Image: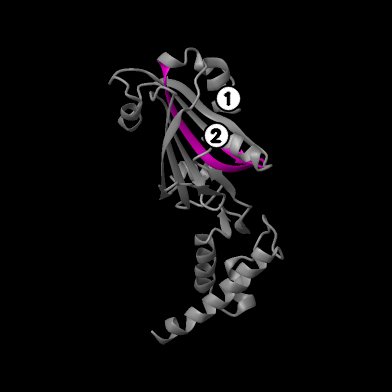
Amino acid sequence: MTSEVQSVPIIKVICDDIAGQIRSGALAPGTRLPSERELGDVRNISRMTARRIYERLESEGLVSRSHRRGWFVSEARLQFALMKSVSFINSAAVRGKEAGSVLLHAEKVIPPEFAREPLKLRRNEDAYFVRRLLQLGGKPAAIETMYLGCARFPDFLAHTLTGSILSLWEDTYGISVGHADATLRGAFLSDEDASVLGVAKGSPNIALTQTMFDADGEPFAYDRQDWRFELAEFLISADFA
């Protein structure tokens, strides 16, 4: 009990020190941090205490753990303005960040209920399923899973699906987003998604789910993005009468 109480100030002091170096720029984004063992040796603390320090900094979005590579200073976050854009690539471009995507899978499927209901599809009605890896600066940032009703997007899978899907909807199909219903929640990455994103199993993420509606209020796309916890933040503006 005594050692636990005494260890709390040590954790806070070291966390504040590392956080201060990160915020001042002394530790630049992408910098590899000492291993838990090395931090323990330098700071004269146990490896378990070192891990708790990194986990606390991770919870603040300041550091991230890369699978089998150790701890790193987090990259600058992409601020996603939900009330202004539903496009990841467009949001990144506005902020001067290089964005892209890699198509992981695309096919025609009978969608699961969680996507079928928001899209108002019949029980056996087909939908297009698209799964992409979203990247910032060439680095993995999020896994995107999308469902779209086939009737509104004929031959959708024949198009290049690595650019802005929003632009594809507008330029090819004449469908613009009138509004979107969005949900944000904290979650943990599946083992598969963690592997694709290059982070440790069980890493936290931010799950953004959106249902897109056209100008007439009809739903046409269901989209989920599972973001690496440390790479994105979401701005929500609200006007109160």
Quarter-wise, where is residue 87 in the image?
top right
Question: What segment carries the magenta color?
Answer: 133-150
Q: Position of residue 219 (x, y in %)?
A: 39, 25
Q: Position of residue 177 (x, y in %)?
A: 48, 27
Which amino acid type is marked by label 1? Ser
Q: Are marks 2 and 1 in contact (CB under 8 Å)?
A: yes
Q: Nearer the viewer, residue 5 or 93?
A: 93
Which amino acid type is marked by label 2? Ser
Q: Residue furthest bottom?
A: 2
Q: Residue furthest front?
A: 241
Chief SS of the magenta region: strand
In the drawing, what numbered circle is on residue 113? none
Display colour scheme: one colour
**Crowd rating for badge 2 (residues with CA inside 10 Å; few <14, some 14–19, many 20+):** some
Quarter-wise, where is residue 170 in the image?
top right
In the drawing, what numbered circle is on residue 167? 1
Kindly identify the residue that appears in the image at 57 percent across and 71 percent down.
15
Location of mark 2 (residue): 87
Q: Is residue 143 magenta?
A: yes
